[in-house]
């Protein structure tokens, strides 16, 4: 299988930034193009009185998402990667799956690694996409220990440091 077209789904989080680095690292040597999509989920007003403020907030959020997308695309272009992108209204899973077509060779997306109760309540976008995507999917996890603190994260970092020192 040859990878010619990569679809990158992003929410502009640090995990998505890591996924974009993977997509670029694959696209450059393979000569593949990247299409970037961002699912914009508008905030809905609780009542009619707040509708004007919510519309204004959504417009600001949409402009920010477009600027972030433009910046990401500019970075790809500097590396000589053919790319395009879109900010599309809708829920993330639906937007991502709507953009996977028969020409998509690889879908790349970050996974936030939620576990336990929060995953039970919220579900996992990555998991739902993996189950339904009609192409290969590369998920990128947060860096080990990134954004985590406490004894469990410290013990992981110590264990990893011990393994790397043991090699020498």
Image: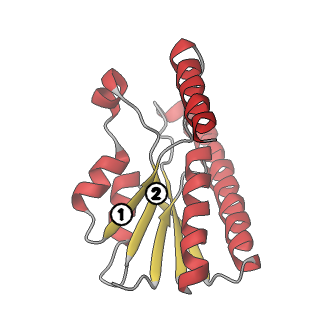
Q: Are marks 1 and 2 in contact (CB under 8 Å)?
A: yes
- The residue under the point 45% across, 63% down is 108
Of residues 46 and 154, which is closer to you in this image? 154
**91 to 77, vertically: above or below:** above
Q: Measuring 56% from the left and 77% from the top, which residue is drawn there?
A: 27
Task: In the rendered structure, find residue 78 and report the number of the disc placed on it.
Answer: none
User: Which percent across, then down, holds residue 97?
Assistant: 33, 64
- The answer to whether residue 144 is left or right of residue 97 is right
Q: Nearer the N terminus, badge 1 or badge 2?
A: 2
Residue highlighted by disc 1: 137
The x and y percentages for residue 21 are 61, 61
Against 163, residue 7 (above or below) is below
Q: Return the residue at label 2.
A: 109
Tell me where residue 114 sits by quadrant.
top left
Q: Position of residue 146 (x, y in %)?
A: 60, 34
**Image quadrant in which you'd find residue 66:** bottom right
Front-lying residue, 79 or 162: 162
Name the residue at 25% across, 71% down: 134
User: Residue at the top extreme?
Assistant: 151
Question: How far apart, in angstroms, are the residues tagged by discs 1 and 2?
Answer: 8 Å
Query: Which image quarter holds the C terminus?
Result: top right
* Residue at left offset 64%, top offset 43%: 57
Label 1 CA crowd tier, 10 Å (few <14, some 14–19, many 20+): some
Q: Measured from the top left, where is residue 91 in percent x and y? A: 39, 51
- Give whichever of 47, 108 is nearer the camera: 108
Residue 95 vs residue 130: left or right?
right
Q: Nearer the viewer, residue 108 or 143?
A: 143
């Amino acid at each position: 299988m040859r990878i010619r077209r990569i679809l990158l789904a992003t929410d502009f989080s640090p995990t998505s930034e890591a996924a974009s680095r993977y997509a670029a690292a694959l696209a450059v040597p393979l000569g593949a193009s990247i299409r970037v999509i961002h699912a914009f989920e508008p905030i809905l007003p609780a009542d009619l009185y707040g509708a004007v403020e919510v519309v204004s907030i959504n417009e600001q959020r949409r402009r920010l998402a477009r600027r972030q997308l433009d910046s990401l695309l500019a970075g790809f272009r500097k590396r000589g990667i053919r790319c395009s992108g879109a900010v599309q209204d809708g829920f993330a899973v639906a937007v991502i799956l709507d953009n996977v077509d028969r020409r998509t060779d690889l879908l790349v997306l970050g996974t936030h690694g939620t576990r336990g109760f929060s995953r039970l309540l919220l579900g996992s976008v990555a998991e739902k996409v993996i189950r339904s995507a009609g192409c290969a999917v590369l998920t990128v996890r947060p860096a080990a220990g990134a954004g985590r603190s406490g004894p469990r994260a410290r013990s992981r970092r110590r264990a990893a440091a011990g393994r790397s020192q043991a090699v020498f």
